[in-house]
Amino acid sequence: MAMSRSDSDLAAIYDAMACGVVVRNAAGSVVFANAAAKRIFGRAPDELEGAESPGEDRRIREDGTTMPDDEVPNVAAQARGEPIRNVMMGMVRSDGYVRWLLVDAVPIKDSFGRVREVVSSFTDITDRKKAEHELERQALHDPLTSLPNRSLFLDRLEQGLRTARRVATPLALLVMDLDRFKEINDTFGHRAGDLLINQVAERIRSDLRETDTVARLGGDEFAILLPGADQDGAWRVAQKIITALQRPFEIEGDAHEISVSIGMAISPQHGEDVETLLRRADIAMYSAKRTPGGSAVYAEEADPEGSNQLALMAELRHTIETDQLQVVYQPIVGFTEGEVMRVEALARWRHPSRGLVAPGEFIPLAERSGLVKSLFSRVLAMTLAQCAAWRDANLPLQAAVNLSIRNLLDPELPRVVGQALERAGIPPGWLAFEITETMLMAEPNRVLRTLAELRDLGVQLAIDDFGVGYSSLAYLQRLPAYAVKIDRSFVSRMTRDRGSAEIVKLITNLGHALGMKVVAEGIEDQATYDACAAVGCDSAQGFFVGRPMVATAIPAWLAQGHRTTTIN
Ligand code: C2E
Ligand code: MG
Ligand code: MG
């Protein structure tokens, strides 16, 4: 078809094409260039045609290195006599501007098989490259402060450590967090929190050298990498930062004061790999929190128990997002019908070297270090995902998740819970939260408000470990709870101790009088089970009924004769 067209016709077709087309003769001179080529190279047609190459620009490869002449697509196609496709080539203009082209070069041969002409076609992908670059930048930077994020920082730390080893210089790692950030965030809102973080980032940045890296690891946590700095150098920088952050911050007309804790670890003496150094800087940061000056260098703690706790706390923060954090489920079963009312989600930390760490050990650490919020979100998400999986397998099981006081004081809690439910597609009524009596007394009004909001979402609430705290009855009555769980200490002594048996009976009657269901916790044998049933408890929980188990063990446990129920 094209054969019958006139040259001017063909030229019009080429000019209509979006990609640039340049045809060169065997000598490498341009014999034809279409309109797009001229546009891309910014040359008049006659300037292009006849020219040896469309520009004297330096050509670079995708990685930025100079592209040798024999690698330039049209040259290579000519030399090898075969098509060269999809070559990314950058043309560096004298002013430094780089135009990126995606090039195909195809040789056209004469009847003797000699390359007569080479047709190059190319697309200008500069904008696309820019967009990719921007995406990459976004993936490696914190959007709020534009500082490097955790993954870029880890990369720099890794590189820094390698260089430090090679040239035998020290390197200092500083990890810091703001001591009162959460309060400001909670009291003045996220916008104020964001503005504060930004100003903090700005002050740290202006105090550092060009070669230092400051990154935002997340939340109110920053890390600073000081190549070449020893302990003295690190200490000086820490003091500078502490001083810089002591000046009040002005945010939306209010002055705020914050303090920071900075932990330092120096390579090589405290570690030569990323993980060790980070962990030790974290440990130092926790001791900094207990130091009046606000900064501390890593030291093998004199008290082995203390350092053990600190080490655990430091590790915990990196664990929450990994599969070391697990959830096991313990069934709660109705006395009359034996149906499964719920499963209680219990957190487990499968530590690679310490083995199973009990929640009694790490939940208090999480509370002290402000990690309990992410811990909770993670346990909730895992539990709801599990409920959805069970439901899809035709095992409708409702779940109960434990809350910590810090969770209850978090104004974000109802929103976080609502979102998690929505994401998992689980009806709110299937989820219950367990709160302890002592938590209720901490800040009654604030807590009651949060509980009411949770209740409005449709989520159920139960009072955990009941009987060991000191709740006021009037207060209990105002609680929007559906159940009380009698503390294990009374239940387990019931068959041996009349007093405990009386307490269980009393609490059961009290619960019923307040319109709540009563759950007996910690039932370990048949006699206790019977005793609880006799005093009128509604449901049983304990090793006798079912131990906390991994999710995959639940179907087999159910198959032993337990039924699921969706009635509350
Ligand atoms: P809890 O909410 O009262 O949970 C019941 C605890 O009693 C569980 O201990 C369970 O394993 C244990 N238990 C159940 N039946 C028996 C029994 O028959 N005999 C004995 N001796 N013990 C029994 P666990 O899993 O070690 O949890 C301890 C506490 O840690 C929980 O007490 C709860 O307050 C807290 N916890 C667990 N997971 C989480 C969580 O994800 N978030 C929060 N904030 N707290 C959690
Ligand atoms: Mg509980
Ligand atoms: Mg309990």
Image (cartoon, rainbow, N blue to C red):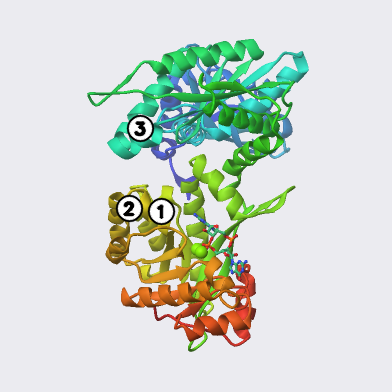
Where is mark 2, residue-wise?
Answer: 447
Q: Quadrant of residue 185?
A: top left
Residue toward you, 90 or 370: 370
Q: Answer few, some or many: residues within 10 Å of disc 2's Cα (few below 14, many 20 plus, some between 14 and 19).
A: many
Ligand 1, by image quadrant, is bottom right
Kindly state the secondary structure of the residue where label 2 is placed: helix
Q: Quadrant of residue 455?
A: bottom left
Numbered circle sitting on residue 474: none
Q: Nearer the viewer, mark 3 or mark 2?
A: 2
Residue found at x 48% / y 33%: 125
Q: Nearer the viewer, mark 1 or mark 3?
A: 1
Residue toward you, 35 or 215: 215
Q: Answer few, some or many: residues within 10 Å of disc 3's Cα (few below 14, many 20 plus, some between 14 and 19).
A: some
Where is mark 3, residue-wise?
Answer: 194
- Asked if 320 appears above or below 58 in the picture, the reply is below
For the residues marked 2 and 1, what is the alpha-carbon distance in whole angstroms? 8 Å
> Residue 305 at what x, y percent from top left?
68, 38
- Do labels 2 and 1 touch, CB within 8 Å? yes
Q: Is residue 322 left or right of residue 42?
A: right
Where is mark 1, residue-wise?
Answer: 439
> Residue 59 at what x, y percent from top left?
59, 21
- Asked if 538 appears above or below 24 in the picture, the reply is below
Q: Earlier in the sequence, mark 3 or mark 2?
A: 3
For the residues marked 1 and 3, what is the alpha-carbon distance in whole angstroms? 29 Å
> Residue 542 at what x, y percent from top left?
58, 73
> Residue 320 at what x, y percent from top left?
57, 48
What amino acid is at disc 1? Met
